[in-house]
Image: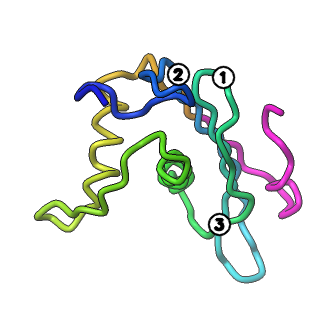
Amino acid sequence: MDNDCLIVNKRGQCANTIAIIGRRWFDKHHGNTYHATEVYVDGEFIGKEDFKYGYGDQFIETGMQILQDNHLMEATEDRLPSGMDKDYYEFEMDRRKHPEKYVVSVADVERKGELKQSFMR
């Protein structure tokens, strides 16, 4: 993989577009937030997570994990001296360096069942 190519598509070529689409649901009864995430690379569905604990932008980190689980992004499990996950740091730096490649979108939903609804398929 080329040094400037953090994420590849299913054909092993540098990805041109990475779409991470999330939904968040707040469980008012227990006070927790959950999310669902779908990932597309170059318009092709890669994978999804239907229900996972996490608030704010954690759906983005789940999207990165989906890329790694599908072998489209290397998973090193290394840590930076600060303790931060090195893979996530590199992912975020790639998003800053190549904002034109990334589409990141999230919607807050009212009901838990809405997390499992398909986004684009």
Residue matched to label 1: 43
Residue 61 coordinates in the image, percent (x, y)? 47, 53
**Quadrant holding the N terminus:** top left
Q: What residue is drawn where x is 48% and y is 46%?
A: 71
Contact (CB < 8 A) between labels 3 and 1? Answer: no
Q: Distance between the residues labelled 1 and 2?
A: 7 Å
- Relative horizontal placement of residue 114, taking residue 20 as reference (left or right): right
Q: Residue 21 at what x, y percent from top left? A: 65, 39
Q: Is mark 2 on a helix, strand or loop?
A: loop
What residue is drawn where x is 33% and y is 27%?
A: 5
Q: How far apart, in angstroms, are the residues tagged by discs 2 and 3?
A: 24 Å
Q: Is residue 71 above or below residue 13?
A: below
Residue 79 badge: none
- Whole-percent x, y for residue 40 in the image: 63, 33
Q: Which of marks 3 and 1 is in front?
A: 1
**Dot 2 or dot 3, earlier in sequence:** 2
Q: Give the range drawn in magenta.
A: 105-121
Which label sits on residue 52? Answer: 3
Q: Give percent across and percent down for residue 56.
A: 53, 55
User: Colour scheme used in the picture?
Assistant: rainbow
22, 77: nearer the viewer? 77
- Amino acid at dot 3: Lys
Viewer-proximal residue among 16 and 113: 16
